[in-house]
Image (cartoon, helix red, strand yellow):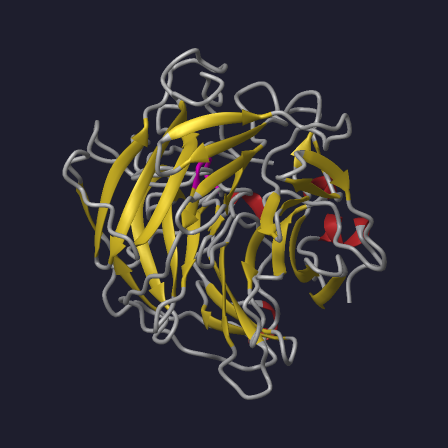
Amino acid sequence: MDEFETARDPLLSEEHKFVSHSPQSHPGRCHIQRASSEGHFSRLLSWRPLLGYSGAFVLAFLAIAGVTVLILERFAADAYPPACRKSSAVAVLPGRSSNTSFELLVWSGMGRHKSPLSDLHSFDAGTGQWHAERASSRGRGGFWRRITWRHPGRGPLPRWKAGTAQVLDNKGGLVVFGGDAFPAHGRHIYESDLWLLEFSSLKWRQANVTAADHARLPDDVGAQKMVVFGGRGAHGLLLNDVWEATLSFPNVTWRLLAPGTKKHHAAEDGGGGKEGVVPAPRKGHSAVLVGEPGSPHMLVFGGRDTQDYFGDLWLFDIKAGTWEQVEPSSRIAPAARDHHAAAFYHGKMFVHGGRSGVSYETSRPLDGLWAFDLQARAWQQVPQPGATPLPRFLHSYVQYAPAGSPDASRLVVFGGETLDNCRLNDVWELSLGSMLWSQLSPPHFCGHKCKMAFRGTEV
């Protein structure tokens, strides 16, 4: 379960969707804050909660690139899988060999014993093998080895519940925003920084952040943008404001799209939506990008406050800056939850896993798959024939388009936490067309208790 709560600010947050803040200059979280666990991944017009996860979500419109400061090396192709963890930052990139369909990058996350991880791994979907691009310590059988920093302190601090997005320009990269970070002294802090991990070089570049004059900032059609909603600030304050980041790495400009409220319930003002309300402040929700390029909207589902889990749906008009509460037309609906995975495909939002319960103390991980038809405004539980992932929450996920396909029709899931507080390091892929799961890498449970609890599922 969550060892720590994180802050959130478009410039400072976790479980949201974006970073550190100064009043009215950028999102106000304490230096950063998921979606969804969520969250959420991003491909042109597809959003992914940075939800992490720290509480808020990041939705990325376009792609971005960057560069960095680590000296990274690739090790043995048959390296042992990375340590079990939850809420890592992940991205999908084209395979670096002719027989590889894609590679999954996994960075940081929360390991066992409340231990943050700072390693970087890649998984080759073609061969089913893991590679330690950079490891913070030796692993089993000597497969991992420590890599030193050429420029100490220049890369992002290890963290979990960060907001993430994937860019698709000529280089491609993983954007990481905020989260619950761990400096050398060991005490966690809520971050609001923004970094880019360039795919071609596997190097990091930190963004130079400025605030925009809301009245003068042009629309910038075609610019790379990310949107952040909600999360938790450094002092435990839950948020429900919305921020947009215009990305021109290394420069990033923040602008406030919708102010938040101090109430933990829908407010009568402050949002200007059709229903005259705004969503309650929250963390652990998911957010996906819906609509056409000229009329982008953000669809938010679930999350929780300090006491209750949410099962509500909200639609945010990104251009108009207004909220509308979405009332499902069907009585059937998934349980209220947080830290789930979400993807939008062919008019439907798909939700997998998460955590739910009458209270936080009695909550349990979930394993169901649900679909919400935005036009019909109806939920439907999706049958899952064949093998399926273990129940989990705080799993990392990314939606991507297979080679040669214009549609982001696949959802890749990594790690998370399952029953008995056991963390995972397996990889699954869901075809959003056939609704069939494929296990790409089996779990290798960490710790005697979890190995005994899940005997028969580990390979």
User: Which of these two is toward me, 442 or 169?
Assistant: 169
Side (left or right) of 173 relative to 109 = left
Q: Is residue 359 magenta?
A: no
Q: Looking at the image, which residue is at 59% across and 31% down?
A: 302
The image shows residue 65 at horizontal and vertical percentages of: 31, 65
Task: Please say if 93 is above or below 354.
Answer: below
The image shows residue 159 at horizontal and vertical percentages of: 42, 48
Total labels: the figure holds 0
* Quadrant holding the N terminus: top right
Q: Looking at the image, which residue is at 33% across and 34% down?
A: 9
Q: Looking at the image, which residue is at 64% across and 80% down?
A: 127
* Quadrant holding the C terminus: bottom right
The image shows residue 404 at horizontal and vertical percentages of: 56, 76
Q: Residue furthest bottom?
A: 98
The answer, for residue 382, to whether it is visible in the render is: yes
Side (left or right) of 253 relative to 427 = left
By secondary structure, the bulk of the magenta-drawn segment is best described as: loop
User: Which of these two is toward me, 207 or 380?
Assistant: 380
User: Which of these two is toward me, 75 or 307?
Assistant: 307
Q: Quadrant of residue 64?
A: bottom left
Side (left or right) of 102 relative to 32 = right
Which residue range is magenta in the image? 53-57
The image shows residue 367 at horizontal and vertical percentages of: 75, 44
The answer, for residue 285, to whether it is visible in the render is: no
Task: Please say if 121 is above or below 264.
Answer: below
User: Which of these two is toward me, 18 or 204?
Assistant: 18
Q: Looking at the image, which residue is at 63% across and 27% down?
A: 311
Q: Quadrant of residue 21?
A: top left
Task: Please say if 18 is above or below 249.
Answer: above
